[in-house]
Amino acid sequence: MLEKIASINAVVNAFIWGVPAMVCIIGVGLLLSVKTNFVQVRKFGLAMKNTLGKIFDRKQAKDGSMSPFQAVCTALAGTVGTGNIAGVAGAIALGGPGAIFWMWCSAFLGMCTKFAEVTLAIHFREKNSNGEYVGGPMYYIKNGLSKNWYFLAVLYAIFGVLTVFGTGNATQVNTIVTSINSALKNYHIIDSTNNFTSNLIFGIFIAALVAMVLLGGIKRIGQVSERLVPFMAVLYVILACGVILLNIKSVPGVLASVFSGAFSPKAVTGGAVGSMFLCMKKGISRGIFSNEAGLGTGSIAHACADTDNAVHQGMFGIFEVFMDTIVICTLTGLVILLAAPGISYGQAAGAELTISGFTATYGSWVSVFTAVAMCCFAFSTIIGWGLYGSRCIEFLGGEKCVRPFFVVYSFVSIIGATLNLGLLWDIAETFNGFMVVPNLIALFLLSGQIKQFASDMK
């Protein structure tokens, strides 16, 4: 049965992430970039000023909303996760070092795409009966396009609900328990014979934490995100920069392999990866999996922001993609290519490949710190995607569905902790592709409005 599901998913995934999808993702990103006169370049300095400058702004948000900084942290909580660790490792193993180059390309255009998504989410958002701001792709499709396109909003919400359990929860929890087990084994606290028991305990504990945060409402989600995200990002960047500095002499050669491998992966991987398109596909798809530009999910968190300036909040979209892919994914890629021993190109890999880069540099003791970083990354993603799923199901069934959804979503953590989720990763990537389709259509149809927003920027 599992083999049949895997084979069906492989066919669907190959279509969803095939040539048409690559053309659409890059095409819409390029169209928006041209129409906004490359706002991600033109206003990059302003974007950094408006975003980094908010880090120390602790303005209290109104009831039913988050502060702009809490909103960006919640969105980053959804994007900065295992995609930056396991996703990058998988892209390099299956697509070669050149996959990093294609991640950069997708991020360059993705900065404009996410600017558009966030700006539209603020402009077309609504308030529900609880006085909370609700928005995202389903709302800018509903309120920005004619009724003939409403079915796209429904499709997006359905795909969103189906995706969050895998992408946002089970795969993230699986990464948490893998990293914790790795650290415990290094110190001989556990062995491989009692993994199920320890994983079950971890799963129950994580489920309780997830429920406690999500059932606390929008305020608690924002408060947890604004504390967790900066901590985890700084910790990870410090550890990764240390690996690069200790291997600084090898950096030019590694960067050369990234550029040459983008167009001729066979020459870099010894023939294990022979297709430039495969390299491009893995880089772009895993880049989108990580930064979510084109997916539209991050705009759901931004729609909760206590702000009346849609364009200024859109700047956070540029900042997010830059931090997620250009900074953190690049650091992960360099850690793997500089320090991970014996990369088996052409074979699937995950978080263990990234961890091996750290432990090869610092020793087994660093597994404790990588476990902490992994837990923070993954837990923040669970919280962020919990919010995304709740907004999608609220759009479909009303606010009465939200709390039951949070309960079910929390219990999925136990499943993620105790099962082998190799197939689920692939299915999650496929559903991500399904979510991209209605969102890209909406961005294309609303590109004129996005052009006007960019033109009105001060």
Image (spheres, helix red, strand yellow):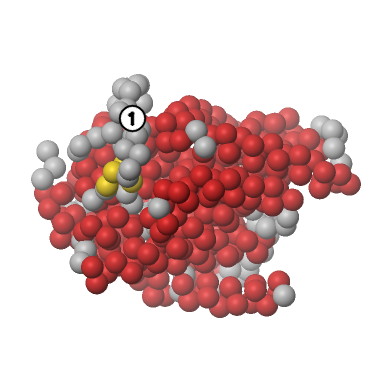
Task: Say which amino acid is labelled 1.
Answer: Asp
Expressed as whole percent of the image width and height from the top left, the position of residue 285 reads 47, 61
- Foreground pick, 1 / 127: 127
167 vs 79: above or below: below
Q: Is residue 430 visible?
A: yes
Figure quadrant of residue 28 = bottom left
Q: Residue 237 in the image: x percent, y percent?
A: 51, 33
Please give left or right for residue 407 compared with residue 365 in the image.
Answer: left
Relative to 49, say whether 259 is above or below: below
Residue depicted at 64% across the width and 37% down the height: 208
| Residue sitting nearer the eye, 44 or 140 | 140
The residue that disc 1 covers is 63
Name, please, the residue furthest toward the right.
193
User: If the image is split into quadrants, where does the C terminus sit?
Assistant: top left
User: Going 11% across and 49% down the picture, which residue do you hit?
Assistant: 455
Q: Residue at x 41, y 48 (%)?
A: 399
User: Foreground residue, 154 or 74?
Assistant: 154
- Estimate the x, y position of residue 81 in percent, counting from the top left: 53, 44
**Secondary element type, mark 1:** loop
Relative vertical location of residue 251 with respect to residue 281 in this rendering, above or below: above
